[in-house]
Amino acid sequence: MGRITTLGEFIVQSQSNHPEAKGELSRLLSAIRLAAKVVNSQTNKAGLVDNIMGNVGTTNVQGEQQKKLDVYANDVFIDALQARHELCGIASEEEDDFVAFTSKECKNAKYVLLMDPLDGSSNIDVNVSIGTIFSIYQRQSPVGTVATMEDFLQKGVEQVAAGYVIYGSSTMLVYSTGNGVNGFTFDPTVGVFYLSHPNMRCPKSGKIYSINEGNYPHLPSGVRNYIKHCKELDPPTKRPYTARYIGSLVSDFHRNLIKGGIYLYPSNSLAPNGKLRLLYECNPLAFLVEDAGGKATDGRGKRILEIEPKELHQRTPFFIGSSNMVDEVEQFLEESDTRKAVEVM
Ligand code: AHM
Ligand code: MG
């Protein structure tokens, strides 16, 4: 076997590039690696073990049915992260409020983490890829105290690190500390993540657009025009776009990051702020895409990373992917807004 870098080696090497680092972030990343392996082993068994499929019978704060594997992944990540004493608290899609870790060691920790422990979980029971998304910040409250809400309500630009795990045809962990996006593929035979996708770059343009077109009648007219444009190019033989929508954000994002494309979850007349949550779904992916040369906005020219969060489970319209494609759809939205403004004059 040639010289292959493991995730563990990569974390250690990256730390040595920062002589001032004390290893806290490295230990945090290795806790995420451990939890990812545990969740991976369970997702692989979905269908075999009947206590991990289906609903728990409870709903989360957003009124969504919680799946057994959602709750399981949430517990695994919280346990693994708390055990390393590098976080003073976490926030999760599956928790109504943030969870402060109150041991003496955890109160002395300088980071907080926000996560969607298992995104796209409606796909679990039908064997489609799902993912974990995470985002890490330095706390705002003083070290030695219990975490407060201000530690979690930070703009995405303040992220120290972000990443995701995709449980797909293979399992990958992709992350960035702001110095390049790197992807590691899990080899289940030895239980190790290997660096398989160094320095990932998002192509400037792409052919793929990913949106739930079932929402078409409820979408803003600018987005409807963009979808028409994707389908009705002239001459038709030159059609450059192709539609791909898994309905599992991590998977749709991961594919578009590699191949070039755009993922859209706009506002719609039924959900004025769209569906996706700013803090633990949009911000981490926006951090990654920008570090890889792509773009993420709310469709109206505002960088996702610059949105001021007001609450933990805040939603935002989300447009992410190849920069030229995000610019193009924004142009459609702007044109349609201008047309409407002229009509009411
Ligand atoms: P979840 O956090 O409840 O799993 O919801 C998020 C998921 C994303 O993974 C996916 O892109 C989106 O919801 C799909 O929503 P829709 O079914 O409305 O297209
Ligand atoms: Mg989610």
Image (spheres, rainbow, N blue to C red):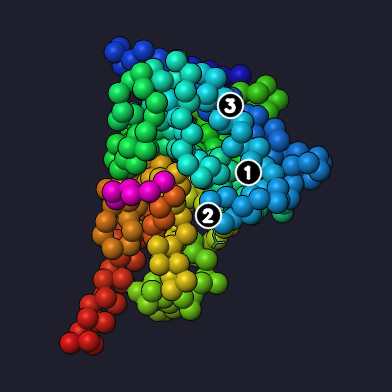
* Viewer-proximal residue among 125 and 230: 125
Q: Is tag 2's residue or tag 3's residue first in the polypeptide sequence?
A: 2
Q: Report the residue marked by disc 1.
A: 70
Q: Residue at x 33, y 48 (%)?
A: 309
- The residues bearing labels 3 and 1 have C-alpha atoms spaced at a distance of 14 Å
Residue 172 falls in image quadrant: top right
Q: Residue at x 59, y 55 (%)?
A: 64
Q: Is tag 2's residue or tag 1's residue first in the polypeptide sequence?
A: 2
Looking at the image, is 9 positioned above or below residue 79? above
- The residues bearing labels 2 and 1 have C-alpha atoms spaced at a distance of 14 Å
Q: Report the residue marked by disc 3.
A: 79
Q: Are marks 3 and 1 in contact (CB under 8 Å)?
A: no
Looking at the image, is 33 positioned above or below residue 211? above
Residue 290, percent from left and from top: 33, 44
Residue 189, percent from left and from top: 70, 25
Q: Which residues are magenta?
A: 307-312
* Viewer-proximal residue among 299 and 226: 299
Q: Is residue 135 left or right of residue 1?
A: left
Q: Report the residue marked by disc 2.
A: 62
* Residue at disc 2, CB closer than 8 Å to ligand 1: yes
Element carrying mark 1: helix
Quarter holding the N terminus is top right
Residue 111, percent from left and from top: 38, 26
